[in-house]
Image (spheres, grey):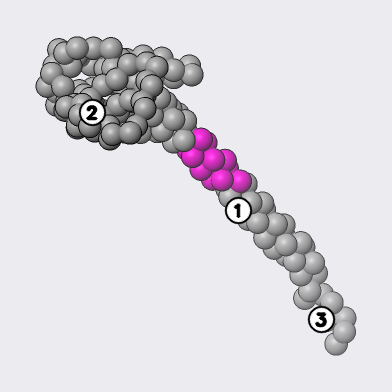
Amino acid sequence: MINAFHKNSKGFSLMTVIFVMVIFAMAGVAVISLISGSASMVGNEYGSQKAFSIAQGGLEYIGMQLDGDSDWSDNNTETKILGGETFTITYIAQTTDTATVQSTSTVNGVTRTLQEDFSRGGGWEAFAYAIYSESNLVVGDKCNVNVTGNVAVGGNIDVE
């Protein structure tokens, strides 16, 4: 009887080895798939963050350009290079003193678009003055005021 069982189980070891090898191969393919998927996600995240930073730099750039411009209504779309990548500035709406601007950048196939509303007197020029006010400025009595630098007031200066 033992001899009969032995004759019927000759291919059992070979089948077991093949089965184990197939399991290991499938596990290896799964691990490689996970690793390549993770690498792809890291690349997309890097591209997304870099595109966001470039687009944000575009808004800062255009803010500085608008600060020195007396009429914002005649500005056009422009593309510039920052950090080896490009950003494109598009004017969505604009008047002489206001502008809605989009900055778009694409890095590694990932596009980020940021939008900002600019208005004259919105704070860009505030830092160029020793005193800056968009309304009236009142200086009370018994107050000595020595100002070194420019003063910008959107209303009246009242000295009591």
Give the Cα separation between the discs numbered 2 and 1: 78 Å
Q: Which residues are magenta?
A: 35-46
The percent position of residue 4, horizontal first and vertical second, equals 83, 81
Q: Position of residue 107 (x, y in %)?
A: 43, 27
Amino acid type at mark 3: Phe
- Tell me which residue sits at (48%, 19%) in the image: 83
Q: Nearer the viewer, mark 1 or mark 3?
A: 1
Crowding at dot 2, Cα within 10 Å, few <14 / some 14-19 / many 20+, comes out as: few
Mark closest to the chain's N terminus, 1 or 3 = 3
2 or 1: tag closer to the N-terminus? 1
Residue drawn at 28 percent across, 34 percent down:
141
Give the residue type at disc 1.
Answer: Ala
Residue 128 seen in this snapshot: no
Query: Of tags 2 and 1, which is closer to the observer?
Result: 2
Mark 2 or mark 3, whichever is nearer to me? 2
Q: Residue furthest front?
A: 142
Q: Position of residue 152 (x, y in %)?
A: 26, 21
From the viewer's side, name the closer residue of 144 and 135.
144
Task: Say if mark 2 contacts mark 3, CB within 8 Å.
Answer: no
How far, Cα to Cα, is label 2 from label 3? 115 Å
- Asked whether 36 falls inside the magenta stretch, the response is yes
The residue that mark 3 highlights is 5
Question: Tag on residue 159?
Answer: 2
Dividing the picture into quadrants, the one containing residue 52 is top left
Task: Quickly name the residue at label 1.
Answer: 30
Q: Quadrant of residue 134?
A: top left
Q: Quadrant of the N terminus?
A: bottom right
Residue 120 in magenta? no
Circles 1 and 3, Cβ within 8 Å, touching? The answer is no
